[in-house]
């Protein structure tokens, strides 16, 4: 299970108004300068550095040009001509956001072709600190492994556990509880809250079987718990 998400449905807003028909958008690119602090007594004759000033980079935007999108696409041209530093928010389908301020560094329409569509490209220069926001699906309120004890003891905000299983036990079930999640999966299989999963087969004695328990909610990032089932 990769946890990867589709980016279809990603949106970009300018001053609270959605920019229409975007086909491609990049995220802020966080980089930092480097400051050489090497001295005559630097250890082992190696150069030493500390982090310098940070930069949010550029955000590239492409889409189908809509001349009636006055608060979105046309608004980018207005910002460019006025040199306005505007507020922008990128929102991904899982609820993750980038919030940043930027000025329009470039704007252009695509070349006109006989069978081509009219598109646009814009470059936004991030100024100041971009903020990454992550809204996660709810935590579990309980997590139980039959015949095994979680180490450490279960806590909603602890996401990785070991459960030691006796040698003679060949399979276990896992019971997750979260009444507010849209769905819960155990080992990629949907399980109702408070209901044991189907039997999970363990490996040979001395092996470790890793299982993921995931809560999902529409418009939010998944919340994942990892259990390492260790057979004695």
Image (tube, rainbow, N blue to C red):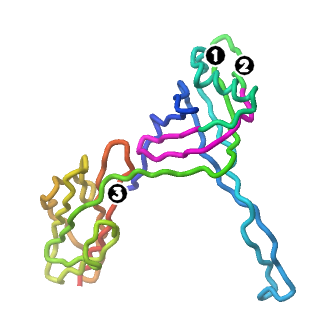
Identify the residue position indicated by label 1 in the image: 116
Q: What kind of element bears circle 3?
A: strand
Farthest residue, direction top:
114
Quadrant (top left, top right, bottom left, bottom right) of the C terminus: bottom left
Q: Which residues are magenta?
A: 88-107
Marks 1 & 3, CB-CB < 8 Å contact: no
Could you tell which of marks 2 and 1 lies nearer the N-terminus?
2
Picture quarter containing residue 175? Answer: bottom left
> Is 215 left, or right, of 16 in this rendering?
left
Residue nearer the viewer, 50 or 199: 50
Residue 143, percent across and down?
Answer: 21, 67
Residue 216, percent across and down?
Answer: 30, 50
> Is 42 left, or right, of 26 in this rendering?
right
Q: CA distance from mark 2 to mark 3?
A: 45 Å
Picture quarter containing residue 162? Answer: bottom left
Identify the residue position indicated by label 2 in the image: 111
Residue nearer the viewer, 214 or 166: 214
Residue nearer the viewer, 5 or 18: 18
Compared to residue 127, the image places residue 9 above or below, namely: above
Compared to residue 161, the image places residue 128 above or below, namely: above
The stretch drawn in magenta includes residue 96: yes
Number of numbered discs visible in the structure rendering: 3
* Residue under the point 18% across and 71% down: 145
Marks 2 & 3, CB-CB < 8 Å contact: no
Compared to residue 14, the image places residue 201 above or below, namely: below
Picture quarter containing residue 15? Answer: top right
Identify the residue position indicated by label 3 in the image: 223
* Residue under the point 58% across and 38% down: 88
- Dot 2, crowdedness within 10 Å: few (<14), some or many (≥20)? few
């Amino acid at each position: 299970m990769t946890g990867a998400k589709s980016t279809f449905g990603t949106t970009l807003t300018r001053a609270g108004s959605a920019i229409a028909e975007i086909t491609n958008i990049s995220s802020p690119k966080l980089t930092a300068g480097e400051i050489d602090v090497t001295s005559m007594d630097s250890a082992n004759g190696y150069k030493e550095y500390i982090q310098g000033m940070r930069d949010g980079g550029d955000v590239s935007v492409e889409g189908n040009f809509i001349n009636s999108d006055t608060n979105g696409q046309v608004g980018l041209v207005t910002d460019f001509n006025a040199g306005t530093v505007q507020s922008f928010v990128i929102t991904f389908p899982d609820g993750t956001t980038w919030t940043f301020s930027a000025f329009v560094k470039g704007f252009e329409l695509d070349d006109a072709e006989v069978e081509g569509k009219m598109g646009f490209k814009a470059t936004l220069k991030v100024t100041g600190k971009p903020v990454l926001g992550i809204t996660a699906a709810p935590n579990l309120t309980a997590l139980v492994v039959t015949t095994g004890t979680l180490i450490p003891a279960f806590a909603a905000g602890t996401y990785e556990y070991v459960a030691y299983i006796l040698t003679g036990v060949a399979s276990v079930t896992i019971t997750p509880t979260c009444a507010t999640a849209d769905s819960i999966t155990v080992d990629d299989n949907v399980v109702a809250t408070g209901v044991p999963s189907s039997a999970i087969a363990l490996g040979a004695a001395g092996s470790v079987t890793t299982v993921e328990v995931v809560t999902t909610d529409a418009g939010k990032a998944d919340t994942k718990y990892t259990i390492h089932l260790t057979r004695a």
